[in-house]
Amino acid sequence: MRPAEPPVAGRAGSGPPASVVTVDGAAGTGRTAVAAALAARLGWRWCSMDELYRACAVVYRRTGDRTSVDDIRSGADRASGGHPHPTYKGRRIDGLHGPGAAGADSFADDPRVRAAVTAEVRRFVGSHDAVVEGRGAGQAFPRAALRLHLWASPAQRARRDLAGPELDAARPEASLRLGMMAWNRSSWSLHDTVSRLHERVNVALGRRRRSVSVVIPARCSQDELGLVMPRLAAAAAGCTSDVQIVVVDDGSTDDTAAVAAAGGAQVVSLGATRGRSGARNAGLQVATGDVVVFLDSDMLVEPDFLAEHLRLHEAANDTVVVGGRHHLPPGATDPAGGDVLRRDSREALLDVYSYNMACLAHPWSLAYGCNMSVDRWFLERAAPAGFDESFVGWGLEDQELAHRLAGHGAQWAYSRAASGAHLHHDRTMTAERFAGWKANLRRFVDSHEDASALERLVPGMDPSRNVDYVDVYRRFDGGPTTADMTGLLVVRVPGSDDPLPAVQDAVANGADTVALVDEGDRAELAVLAEAAAPGLGVRLYSGADWERLSPVPGAG
């Protein structure tokens, strides 16, 4: 290898532009197996930067001459999924996974060697489409069609039972950057991972478009839909993906179906009422989108509503986007009309715990079906039956679904940008409604013993008791709060900067707790911070939130 000249981003060799996918991430996530299988599926070349760093360590150990690494080359390509072995002076280098490869990290940390490895990988790729795996691959090809960061839970990585050979047992994890896609492999097989990534590559290359289905259960909602549909149509027009709007007429006795159809929706008429769970399930049966957005029939959305939901699903797999909402006062029909909108009660809870839902012990408890989206592949895998139709009346059917998604590794992103304004209706907790909620609570707990903590919320829902719901919720969740500053390292970044390297450096330096203060209020940082520091629960705040909430607002 020779030291690289300044790289041309996204180009490989002197031929036509190549399509490149990079695969980086933590040890124990099957990077090599994923990269090789994905390349084979695509019919592309693949190579490993980590293999080259290991080859450097082996050759240096044999020769004692650090400059000898200049004669290392990537081996013959085997696009069928075979292993492209590095060579030294034309001879294959063996022992890349043995003790002779110890010290590879020191070569990866050497700027001269790192530049030389980058140059060699570019030479090897040439003008071919390729999957490039290893440390720094995403930085070596910053304009790659798709840049992946694989991660898994600490327990899953410790078991190291994912398919395929791993290249290293320990390495710095500071490789995740904004613009990469964080892919959680904790509960995904190699086959399913590669199948899903193959679809993502086709989208990135423009071979197919991502699509979204909006599922709206509606009963006797003609007036509300008359306001909702034009705004939803504007959001669809502002979205680059294919949009399907499904309105499920749940036994209406007015013109709900006609108003929905006039607004451009595909209407599913049930005849007899099946309730919200049944109506949503009926909508799911005809939904064709890659992403499914569940929306209430009285939510007024903004023009970038759908684009924001979809954007957050591009940041990480298995993401559940929980959109915010504000409540319009009686008679108001325009969120921009100057009326004072009542704040979403969940934001009062997130003020307590931070705007990263992963900091909650029970993040699924804040997933409301009035505005929530999930990848359809993940939904069908984690909850193939959809919503539980035994939940009747008001409450908990959406959180029960979210609980099942959580059990399959859901990642959570609360977005104030993907929000809506809820038309006013009577939300008074009556004795009858409370009885129905308690019946659904019993169904929930009977089906999921690990959800028994929900019973602690009863006092906060009981209309006969005058209690502070935030206090009740804190007894239910019990996680660390914004006020807990012990051992907290605050990372504060301007809205245009990438905070992920600082978060990863903080973890590498032994930080117990990190608060990320993002002036840009980027909701995707919740799922990306979880990938950068799995299990740590990085707290997330906008700059304004931190100044308003923190005991030491100037920190960071």
Image (cartoon, grey):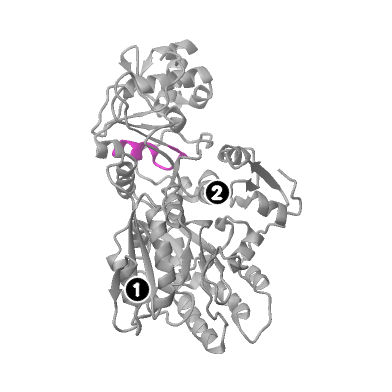
Residue drawn where x is 41% and y is 50% of the image: 317
Please tell me whether residue 30 belongs to the stretch shown in magenta: yes
Q: Amino acid at mark 2?
A: Arg
* Secondary structure under the numbered disc 1 in the rendered image: helix
Q: Position of residue 320 (x, y in %)?
A: 45, 58
Distance between the alpha carbons at the discs numbered 1 and 2: 36 Å
Q: On the rendered structure, is 355 left or right of 22?
A: right
The one of 411 and 108 positioned closer to us in this rendering: 411
Q: Amino acid at mark 1?
A: Val
Q: Is residue 494 above or below residue 282?
A: above
**Span colored in magenta:** 24-37
Q: On the rendered structure, is 17 left or right of 341?
A: left
Q: Residues within 10 Å of mark 1 (few under 14, many from 20)?
A: many
Q: Is residue 326 visible?
A: yes
The one of 514 and 164 positioned closer to us in this rendering: 514
User: Which disc, if any, is residue 522?
Assistant: 2
Residue drawn where x is 26% and y is 34% of the image: 81
Quadrant assignment for the N terminus:
top left
The residue identified by callout 1 is: 259
**Mark closer to the observer (1, 2):** 1
Q: Position of residue 202 (x, y in %)?
A: 29, 42
Q: Is residue 79 above or below residue 490?
A: above
